Image (cartoon, coloured by chain):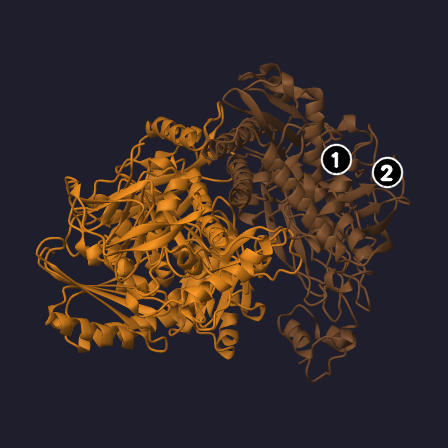
Chain colours: A orange, B brown
Amino acid sequence: MASSTRLAVDIGGTFTDIVLEIGEAGRDGRRLTRKVLTTPRAPEQGVLDGTRAILADAGVGFADIDVFVHGTTLATNAIIERKGAKTALIATDGFRDTIEIAYESRYDQYDVFIEKPRQLVPRALRFTVPERVDVHGAVRLGLDESAVRALVPKLTEAGVESVAITYLHSYANEAHERRTGEILREMLPSLSLTLSCEVCPEVREYDRTSTTIANAYIQPLMAGYLARLRDGFAAEGFKGMVYLMTSGGGLTALETARRFPIRLVESGPAGGAILAANVAAERGERKVLSFDMGGTTAKICLIQEYTPFKSRAFEVDRAARFLKGSGLPVRVPVIEMVEIGAGGGSIARVDELRRITVGPDSAGSEPGPASYGRGGMLPTVTDSDVVLGKIDPARFAGGTIALDVEAARGAVDRAVGQPLSLGSETAAYGVGEIVDENMANAARVHAVERGAVIGEHTLIAFGGAAPLHASRLAEKLGIARIVVPANAGVGSAVGFLRAPVAYELVRSRYMRLDRFDAAAANAVIEAMSAEAQALVAPGAAGRPVFETRVAYMRYLGQGHEIVVPLPARPLTGADAATMRSAYEKEYAQLFERFIPNAVIEVLSWSVTVSTEATRPDAVADPSRGAGPKPIGSRAFYDARLSKRVDVPVYWRGDMKPGGVVPGPAIIAEDETSTFVSALFDAWLDNAGGITLERRRA
Amino acid sequence: MASNSLGQIDLQIMWNRLIAVVEEQAQTLMRTAFSSIVREAGDLSAGVFDLKGRMLAQAVTGTPGHVNSMAESVKHFIRHFPVETMKAGDIYITNDPWMGTGHTNDFVLTTPCFKNGRLVALFSCTSHIMDIGGIGFGPDATDVFMEGLYIPMLKLAEQGKMNETLMAMIRANTRTPVDTEGDVYSLAGCNDVGCRRLVEMMEEFKLDDLDELATFVIDNSRAAVLAEIAKLPKGSWRNEMTIDGYDAPIKLVATTTVSDTGIHVDYTGTDPQARGGINVPHAYTTAYTVFGLGCIVSARIPNNAGSLEPLTVSAPKGTILNAQKPAPVLSRHIIGQMLPDMVFGCMRQAIPDRVPAEGTSCLWNINVRGRVKDGDGGNYGFSVAITSNGGTGARPAADGLSATAYPSGVRGTPVEIAESITPLIFWKKELRPESGGAGRTRGGMGQIIEISSGIDLPFDLLAAYDRIDYPPRGRDGGVDGAAGYVGLTTGQKLKGKGFQQIAPGERLVVMTPGGAGIGDPRSRDPQAVAHDVEEGLVSRETAQRVYGLPLKAAE
């Protein structure tokens, strides 16, 4: 698609980001970007209006677009706001309340006043039918088809629009779920149906049921939206390919997205991770930590060999404090990232232990930080940056918001300085240190879970607040190199255009390695392979695809599986030994010691079919020379020296590849500012990003 | 001044880091554990201590019972292995109920942590080993020697060399040697991870020892707890509660005294220790008592030697809450987990708006054991605790939580996981309608669970249930929660405590208790009653008779 025209649209909560690329990226091609307000009632309207505008900017039309890639938070928002379809559950007799019993635990050990997450299907709409399959897939009790038929009048009477079907152990035997689906489809053809064996064929009934329900809950809404969008584009003369961005970082065809809309949650952050992977490839950085810090949260994601790590566990709608276990679990392939309540708008205060705390609550954009002068009285991370002098109050957000330094100082004093008897500068420094430490801790935990040594990574910083905090975060993590890419403000949408067409399937099929059954393993893998190939084929449009196969393995008796790569060919009896040694290698990497004599078991298998990711060639590091002249200076408070020092300010547009700006320095641009600490040098690299490198002592 | 205030911020950062270090230690343990109650349910703990044995930080995990008890056990380790004799690569171990966390199933491991050859801290961790031999995980023993292998204070490793004699002894004394050995390695590994992270932090902040940080953490935490206590009314309040006991009811008596210097809970008047294994060593009594106090007095303050110091507990020797060796103690959690309710019963007389009503409180684990038909992976059959719970008590402004652990924080075991590690079939696991005690706010609902053997072999139930004869009590006009029940679908009732065999073809029925209600049910919001009726959790009859909902609204 070297000379093609490609459109990416990312619908967020407030803004819809639009990116249009014409011609070959990075060469003589053009990239246009636009931000328009999201139109929540009819999101396709905002997309169409924004697209018309950006096409006009470029002087091309709908008919010229070859590829349209779309990502949206609509699916997530429908769940958070509980605005999905009227949904019913059909479960195995005796298991009506799986989603309410859930984990039987409290997500906050000491809080006796917590409320559990509100489930998407009320008890009155949770039905059961006699049937039972055991852990091996054997039928212990046949499906009572008359009981299924008897549900039809109840579903109709209650006005149910969508049904989730989740029977116990259906990952081991799908027959009862499929038959139930057939009966309902026959009797109620307009009903939306989601089968757990299709959307999440994995062991653990609560997670599987929750995922199936979430899919059912958003399916009518998303199917309708996607159809209207498709028709709207067609009416404008669009004839190209449409893809949807998934949470796993791959693109999928529109029809697949309509069936499994749950795969669209978190597509925006996934786009950000893809962008970071692309930025890494452009610079030959094999180990990177993507760091996306916006107004409300920071998202941190490990990327090795230009590939983000994947996970299958995710929670939608966590309670305010981002506590694990306070949301609805969804088990779909996602790019693994940690998200914490640390953004420019995160509120700082002093707790009962006289400690400074930051977030997780955010002042958002209304009232916003105190320095916005819109009535916000509580100090935020942005306010602390303003007090310290890291942000130019006249040039914030391209000069659209004039920041009130005194308001920021007053808020920091009231909430932090006075209670702790600290001067406003030291208090502001404390706020910055705490938020940077919170992010550093999240990054450390994330790295540990992957057995990665964090100091070996390069930090890729994007999102409005990240370039201000990247230096200090890197110092805390022992990271020596940082990249701040261009166009960071619409990073997710740019990332959409770099994603491969891909589909990942996971299926539980229990097997002990000491009784390895190659034929059974191949049967599961080949079935998934065929299904994934069929789902990817329309999107791949003839491009070559490749397959990745993995097994989720653990020692017999353990509870958490680790991922072990498998060869992309049929397995043979001899593979039991290679799988064992691959497992032990991974295990020792993660947990230091591996366990002698223990039996190993496979819980699940996974197949990903993907087109080749468009990966740019690495650019050379420019030769270093003298940097540009500063456009001014700012009085920055250096806490270690306990005084203000003049820090030069440079304009990003003035920088030429290789021209070195020594820290401390501030590099300003319209969307954000990059703070270069005294330990770092900065220069523009050959791909348009700012590289920061720690000076050798 | 400037460097002082900066130092204050650095100390805060290091404190945060210390908490992150122990959380990572706990996560490592959870992800590598073999024991199903550890990995699926979170029955573990992890913490870091200074060289005086003062706890500096402890991970928040599923087991409040380890809060003070692990802190005490490190002091015992230091007494047996003085710090000046500790060497890098040493690991110390015990499962002594009176030195550790209250029963032989809990292995406690302590590892000295060195930086540049200098001892800087101790890391300690505990997890619940599924089987340690003896009579098994039930309350039928008549002394502690029947409760499995008893490991005194020993070196598990000496300067990096594993004690293979001890490992062989452990393997030979459990029905699940493979899992148990794996769990020992998993415990050792998590202490290593904690130590490595601590040393990294000390290098970053150029620390040679933890003295200043320890003082900062402990002093600030103590002051914060005392500040919370200062806001409470001062005085003494008494509470009595009777529970089922092993073979006879047991009376628990608590007197809680709030003063300027702290809160003291005294259990004088409580019944003597019992014949069966439901007795509680003192450290475990302290742990659950302090946890209950923490929830209503100092919920946001992390656990460490400073925050725990103002909260003290006493119980006369020989009472069931200060059981003396060789009393059997294996199922000490049954009574231990009642102790927050004991404290709540005192404190509600002082601060009624902050205190819930009585709940199920003790875990209603389905402890099962048996043989399997085909391979066993090196273990002798299966031995599993399937964690399950009843309802919690009503809160002053909200209903109790259904099928939720409190005070324990362990997670329930998924049915599909339980069936993958046992040959059992679950036929039902559903909320138990009408079980939450009625009130202005009602108790949480219990569950109904039905299980049969999936093969033609029997299985053993090691019942350890309470609140069957004495259900959770409602307050201020609220109704009691439903009593628990154990039996067969044939209608035959089973004992709430002790070993019982379920034959193939029979179906075990476990009904967990509901939480108690607060306030007159007739003052409950009629819409909330109507909603419960629509959900099928409260019958129309109850809605009219107990809640006084007009017939029409109840339909």
Q: State left or right for residue A82 relative to residue B334.
A: left
What secondary structure is marked by label 1?
A: loop
Secondary element at image label 2: loop
The C terminus of chain A - image quarter = top left
Left or right position of B443 against A497: right
Where residue B119 sits, quadrant-wise, is top right
* Badge number at residue B330: 1
Q: Is residue A272 above or below residue B212?
A: below
For the residues marked 1 and 2, what is the alpha-carbon distance in whole angstroms? 12 Å
Above or below, A164 relative to B228: below
Give the image location of residue B513, x and y in percent: 73, 56
Which image quadrant for residue A382?
A: bottom left
Query: Which is nearer the N-term, disc 1 or disc 2?
Result: 2
Which residue is under mark 2? Answer: B274
Q: Residue at x 72, y 63 (%)?
A: B394
Residue B273, given in percent of the width and then of the height, sits at 86, 37
Residue A142 in view of the camera: no
Q: Is residue A73 left or right of residue B498?
A: left
Residue B377: horizontal and vertical position, in percent?
53, 29
Q: Quadrant location of the N terminus of chain A?
A: bottom left
Please state the chain letter of the residue tagged with numbered disc 1 in the rendered image.
Answer: B
| In-front residue for pair B117/A495 | B117
Residue in the picture at 78% in, 74% down: B546
For disc 1, the neighbor class at 10 Å (few under 14, some 14 to 19, many from 20) is: many
Q: Badge 2, how many Cα within 10 Å: few under 14, some, many 20+? A: many
Depicted B175 relative to depicted B252: above or below: above
Amino acid bearing label 1: Leu
Q: Looking at the picture, how far across and down is residue A469, in whole percent?
A: 37, 50
Provide the chain ID for the residue under circle 2. Answer: B
Q: Amino acid at mark 2?
A: Ala
